Image (tube, rainbow, N blue to C red):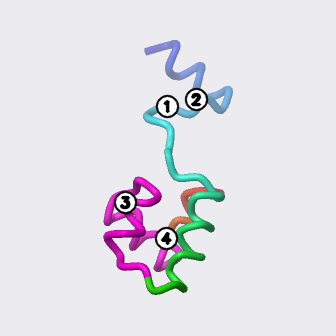
Amino acid sequence: MDGIKQGRKNGVKFGRPSTLTREKANAVLEDMGTDLSVQAIMDKHAISRRSYYSIKTGKYKEKLC
């Protein structure tokens, strides 16, 4: 536990790294303006439905800061 406390003090991030990048989110936003279906966009960019709607509503910006 001391190692975790020390890591947090040093600003180390724990947990699984995000697979959603700014570039991927911007590409999804561009595809939303086309006639592609939601499923086609999710398949093209290999993202989940939750990620798709997170990008659509703008909540991804908070996560990628």
- Quadrant of residue 37 within the rendered picture: bottom left
Q: Nearer the viewer, residue 62 or 35?
A: 35
Q: Are marks 1 and 2 in contact (CB under 8 Å)?
A: yes
Confirm or deny contact between disc 4 and disc 2 (CB under 8 A). Answer: no
Callout 1–callout 4 Cβ contact below 8 Å: no
Which amino acid lies under the numbered mark 2 shown in the image of this protein? Answer: Arg
Category of crowding for the residue at label 2, using alpha-carbon neighbours closer than 10 angstroms: few (below 14), some (14–19), many (at least 20): few
Report which residue position mark 3 lands on: 43
Quarter the C terminus occupies: bottom right
Q: Earlier in the sequence, mark 3 or mark 4?
A: 3
Label 1, on which residue? 14
> Looking at the rendered structure, which numbered label has been put on residue 8?
2
Magenta part of the chain: 36-58
Q: Is residue 61 visible?
A: no
- Determine if the magenta segment contains residue 57: yes
Among the two numbered marks 1 and 3 on one chain, the one whose residue lies closer to the N terminus: 1
CA gap, disc 4 and disc 2: 29 Å
Q: Please report whichever mark, 3 or 2, sits nearer to the chain's N-terminal start.
A: 2
Main secondary structure along the magenta-highlighted residues:
helix
Which element is circle 4 on?
Answer: helix
Tell me which numbered mark, 1 or 2, is placed earlier along the sequence.
Answer: 2
Q: Residue 59: horizontal and vertical position, in percent?
A: 50, 71
- Give the spatial CA distance, label 1 vs label 2: 9 Å
Q: Residue at x 31, y 65 (%)?
A: 49
Amino acid type at image mark 4: Ile
Seen in the picture, residue 23 relative to 27 is either above or below; the reply is above
Question: Real-space Cα distance between discs 1 and 4?
Answer: 23 Å
* Nearest to viewer (mark 1 / mark 4): 4
Which residue bears the numbered disc 4? 55
Residue 60: assigned label: none
Q: Is residue 46 visible?
A: yes
